[in-house]
Image (cartoon, grey):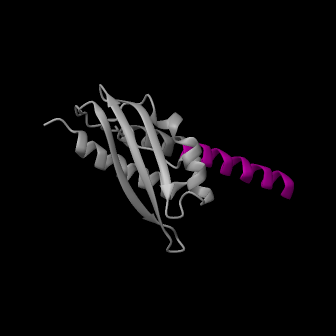
């Protein structure tokens, strides 16, 4: 008899959980606003642009990268990133430097925003900062 009561309690609890879960899911689906990513589009002058930027590691070591981008019709047609002041020997920067080209060349500069290329978040953030500097240099007035 205790076995039957336990089975009934478990069945009722399971049914209640299923009902609660379906009610919660329906509410979440109808009340959640859609998130839309807004990408600003600008026209940039064709040409080659370069800038240097630095970034700090958690060990308070400052590294420098130089970014050189060539633009044609808002498309990045060539990119060169080099590291110096320690970045050229840092394994994280090295992974970025060996992987960034496929993420950059052929892309529209308006929509480019890299995220942890080669597992190197600090170098990627430094590249994004350099990209913003280049955007301001190349922006058509």
Q: Residue furthest top?
A: 73
Q: Please provide percent x and percent y for residue 113.
A: 40, 43
Identify the residue shown where x is 59% and y is 52%: 94
Q: Residue furthest left?
A: 141
Q: Please provide percent x and percent y for residue 44.
A: 24, 33
Identify the residue shown where x is 37% and y is 42%: 31
The residues colored magenta run 1-21
Q: Quadrant of the N terminus?
A: bottom right
Residue 2 within the segment the image draws in magenta: yes
Judged left or right of residue 135, residue 83 is right
Residue 33 within the segment the image draws in magenta: no
Query: Is residue 31 in view from this perspective?
Result: yes
Judged left or right of residue 121, residue 51 is left
Query: Is residue 1 in view from this perspective?
Result: no
Q: Nearer the viewer, residue 5 or 31?
A: 31
- 138 up-or-down from 107: above or below: below
């Amino acid at each position: 008899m205790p076995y039957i009561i336990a089975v009934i309690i478990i069945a009722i609890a399971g049914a209640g959980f299923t009902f609660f879960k379906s009610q919660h899911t329906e509410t979440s689906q109808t009340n959640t606003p859609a998130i839309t990513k807004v990408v600003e589009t600008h026209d940039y002058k064709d040409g080659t642009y370069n800038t240097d930027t630095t970034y700090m590691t958690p060990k308070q070591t400052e590294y420098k990268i130089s970014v050189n981008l060539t633009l044609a019709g808002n498309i990045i047609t060539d990119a060169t990133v080099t590291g110096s002041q320690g970045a050229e020997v840092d394994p994280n920067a090295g992974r970025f430097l060996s992987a960034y080209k496929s993420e950059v060349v052929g892309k529209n500069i308006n929509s480019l925003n890299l995220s942890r290329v080669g597992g190197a978040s600090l170098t990627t953030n430094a590249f994004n900062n350099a990209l913003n500097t280049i955007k301001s240099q190349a922006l058509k007035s």
